[in-house]
Amino acid sequence: MTQPPNQPPQGGFGAPQGQPPADGFGAPRQPPAQGGFGAPQGTPPPPAQPPQPGYGHPQQPGPYGPPPGPYGQQPGAHGQQPGPYGQQPGVQGQQPGPYAAPGPYGHPQPPAVPQPGYGYPQQPPQYPGGPGTTPPPGGTGGGPFKGKPALVVAAAVAGLLVVGGTVYAVTSGGDDGKKPVARHSDDPKASGTPVDPGDGSGDGGADPDNLNDGRKSGEAKVLWYKSAPDAPANGADAPGMWITGKTAVKAAYKQVFAYKVGDGDPAWGPITFPQKICAVTSAKSADDKVVVAYMNGTSDRAKCNQLQEIDLDTGRKGWTATVADGGLFDSAISIELTISGRTLMVGRSESGTAYDLGSGKKLYDKEKYGASCFPTAFAGSADRLVQVASCGAGGSNEHDEISELEPATGKAKWTQPVKKGWKVERTYSVDPLVVYMTNEDKKAWNISTLDAKGTFRSEVKVDEKFAPQCGWALLSSDLQGCQGVAVDANTLYLPTDVSSGGNEIVAISLTDGKAKWRVKSPTDESMYPVRTEGGKLVAYVRPSYDAGGRVVSVPTSGATHTTTGLLQNPQHTADIEGGFYDGQVDWVDGRFYISTARLTGSDQAKEKLMMAFGN
């Protein structure tokens, strides 16, 4: 799947990124130009750098070299010289592939029709751009009018804002007499079950839009809807979304909000920080704790070094800590937070510091080791901690290394060097470990699975364009920053990328990298994996102009793989559902949650923060 020469860069959801930022891991990324699950409302943030060209499937030798070859040996631990994994081994007895080069692991590659690279669609994507990239204007499919009837377009042109079936007139008379504002029209509203629209503070109020009015038979209820707090004109991050058995918790700008899962009433807080939130743990701990980082000031030299532990169910603020700088080029200007069991790992650009999650006590540092190897990114699960390091920068043996660490001590269990030219971009799963890598020089990508000892297990061999959501994130090297992809013990589930109509989800074996089965979206909109549970894959189908989104399940075993509806969201709230900026989604206990990951700071209308659906 090598991209044809001179192919213009496309938008991409799950697409690879180009060169890392000059200030390395943790460097803030520019906000995206368009939304995620739906198009953004209001003025988008400032544009980012143009996206890098796409990557196709590697036709050159892959990141590890041909099996069994060097895989018959076990790589050394930290402090040892890289073994044969980081070398460019020759491949004997192999015919050149369609582009006169052997496959990524020494296997012959079947001829394939050249296609745009992984995650780069022919048309603007329905999910946002890939790691380190920003979708081009018109992405998500979309501006707000993708697939909408001409009447809606005409209404917008005439200066009207349509939200949930209610028409607002956009006028130029804001509080300061300059900025446009949205005012409710005089059209009467029918009665029905009220929904607290809320605001970021959770105090809500009367429901002006009556989001459950007109709900059709078989459609889910809007359990609650919250609009966002005010944000500065240049926008603000709204990272993280954590769901427990009691609360739905969301961070936005300088605050953390908590709502009761059933009715959206305030559960506690909000917690307000003196400066903006700059990093969060994407996952919660087993006992429903998270850690939030915020800036220590507002100047250009301010650092993302203030940590606060929070209990998601009670809102209790636990321990606090200040993250120290590392070396000369290793400051805490920006950081990454990863939970692994009872350990919190704080990643800087060239090192990491581990804390006990229960007490906040510092456990250890992960610093430079071996031949100029610097830890640059971390990923965690309930009992695994994975580290990616950059080694020998600028030298002849420049390469990445993947290690599994003992979470409590930081001791390396194993280390697997990656061949020169390959960059580890994302982990689609930590347990089992599935990594996504790119090679910019070869315009190539690779998805590989490593076993519990760090040995290469398989690589994806499906000749397809895929589109997991690896768009806007706080960090450029957020290893666990992808949605729209799911993994269980033996299977990887990836959504295909299509230019129009419904896509497919492909189930790929982690044993041999081949497709096991695929399932088509039940509508003309794209479908994305959310999670696996109870022997089934749960997926989300995007809303359209004439239907709300859907939550469906697909059996993962057996001979039949068809979608079964779990939730059909209302048609008349499809505009709201589809308008969450770089939408984050989750399915927990029969409820579907969607929230924004970015506030634009627009004054034209109240921004969306979070929404919940259920039966």
Image (cartoon, grey):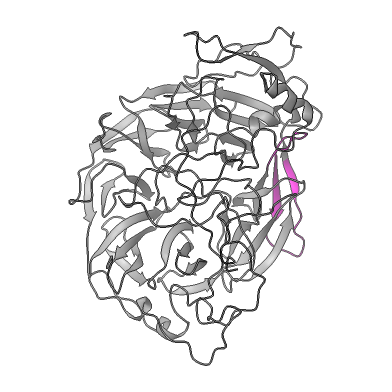
For the C terminus, give its image quadrant. top right
Stretch in magenta: 542-566
| Image spot of residue 249 (x, y percent) | 48, 31
Of 201 and 524, the residue lying toward us: 524
| Image spot of residue 569 (x, y percent) | 71, 34
Q: Residue furthest left?
A: 328
| Image spot of residue 380 (x, y percent) | 40, 53
Q: Is residue 590 above or below residue 456?
A: above
Would you say the magenta stretch is mainly helix, strand or loop? loop
Is 205 on the left-hand or right-hand side of 299?
Answer: right
Is 236 on the left-hand or right-hand side of 497?
Answer: left
Q: Quadrant of residue 333?
A: top left
Q: Is residue 301 magenta?
A: no
Of 53 and 581, the residue lying toward us: 53
Regarding residue 175, the answer to whether it shows in the image is yes
For the N terminus, give its image quadrant. bottom right
Q: Residue furthest bottom?
A: 93
Please give the name of the residue rendered at 47% of the width and 31% of the height, measured from the top-left corner: 250
Q: Is residue 545 magenta?
A: yes
Please give the name of the residue rendered at 46% of the width and 58% of the height, measured from the top-left corner: 427
Q: Is residue 574 above or below residue 408?
A: above
| Image spot of residue 420 (x, y percent) | 37, 72
Please give the name of the residue rendered at 74% of the width and 24% of the height, measured from the top-left corner: 154
Is 368 on the left-hand or right-hand side of 250?
Answer: left
